[in-house]
Amino acid sequence: MDAVIDFNERLRRIANHLLLNASFIDNIGLMHGKMGISIFFYHFARITQNKIYEEYAGELIDEIYQEINKSTPTDFENGLAGIGWGIEYLAQNKFIEADTDDVLEEFDARLKRELDCNPPESIGLLNGLVGFGTYFLKRVQDPTSTNEDTPTLTNKQTLIHLIDELSGKLLNDAIEKYLTGEISIRGKESYLYPSITTRKVRTNSPGKDSGDFELPRMQKLKPTTLKGPRVNTKEIFDITSDYPTLIWFLAELFEKAIFNSKVKKLIQRLLEPLVNTDNFPKLHSNRVLLAAAIKKIENCKAESRSLIGESSNPMEQKSLSGAKINKTKTSSSLATKVLVGNHPFDEINKGRLTLDTISRKLLTGITRETIKSELVPSNTATKYGASGLAWIYNQLLVTTQNRHFEKEMKYWINQSFSFDAARRYVVFNIENENNALGLLEGIAGIGFSYNVLVRSKDVTL
């Protein structure tokens, strides 16, 4: 019982600090700004039944719309793709009432135009193609949308264009470079950790019962240097790493049966290097992250319309003008084989290795202490730390129903709220001090993780 009261108190302190400070930050985006903080408050309001938090969340949404302008970036991390995803998320989970086809009409148009005229060079979630794709995928995942809706058809067509862009990049790049996010450096020196600003977040001033936080700046960590002739690498845990997030995104496209013939080939190409265990991530934390993505592929089931042989390309089902066109009949047995029979990985390896075998190998020998030793010291936030590990273990629980992963998820949630011996500090290491309040690297993300993973079971991410 004490643990529950303790969590509630810490969440209240996080909420109070955000109430005092969130409106003063310049970033309106999902990962580090007002959009993500608003999502935290909507969840916290639902859990606590406190209207103050819900009203403040709505005020933040109003501020976001007032501050959007022509110079607002389009990326997922700080820009329109992430903000639009957040609005769609809130609507789909009934935190707000909105016709998102109307509210996000200009978002759709601008992001589509950006993809057509100035597509991002990277493939990543935060600033690349997967970020754009995640926005459009969320739009078509609206349970109220159908292929009769012009916005849905248009957004699916945009996703098909984006899949082509991804395919072109993966044909030109070596897949191995995306495997762990490592940077190989040949020579005498190798930097094992990036320079990261460390800050302490005080949850209670000595002798006072204060709900506020103090955020004194601390010294930067110096990179560790190894000397020698061998190739060394920089590798840290990062929940937004390109390789697993790309696999996850493609798995969700596969489930929605969007351009499955191309998506299947991309999945095959991405999974080929995992035949060789030498290509596994070196860090246990990154192995768990990759295993969660593999389990997502293993469990994905395409929507029923593809199982009966309908084309997965929405433009082959109905034109944008609304006129029905003839569908090319395909073999339902072939569709069934592709979608619910052998997995893409099994096909390219002729049954020698299964997805389950790969994920088991990735998870073999994983220990909490080893993972803790790999994390940037005392990092409890989502991107590089304990809250991120909690999310990963939750996804493993969802896909496997293995209660071991539930125990691990709760352990890392506890770690994300870890206090020092004096029980006065929650300690974070963050790259950018301006991100200390947000979802990805700040206190809103820690509170959001607990609200969703432990307290809420009625949301769709």
Image (tube, helix red, strand yellow):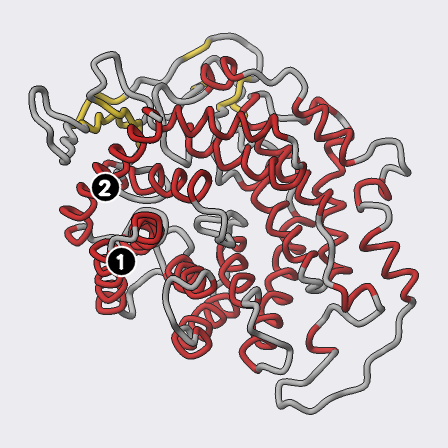
Q: Secondary structure at mark 1?
A: helix
Q: How far across and down, in percent of the image, does residue 425 sit?
A: 22, 23
Up-down: is 251 above or below 148?
Answer: above
Question: In the rendered image of this protein, does residue 258 appear above or below residue 26?
Answer: below
Identify residue type, mark 1. Glu
Write the residue at 48% across / 53% down.
459
Q: CA distance from mark 2 to mark 1?
A: 24 Å
Instruction: Tell me the amino acid under the disc marked 2.
Output: Asn
- Extreme residue in the top direction: 228
- Which is nearer the eye, 420 or 184? 420
Residue at 65% x, 36% y: name it: 401
Q: Quadrant of residue 270?
A: top right
Q: Secondary structure at mark 2?
A: helix
Q: Which residue is mark 2?
A: 434
Point out which mark residue 54 bears: 1
Q: Nearer the viewer, residue 314 or 46?
A: 46
Q: Would residue 366 be found to the left or right of residue 70 on screen?
A: right
Q: Residue at image x 88%, y 31%?
A: 352
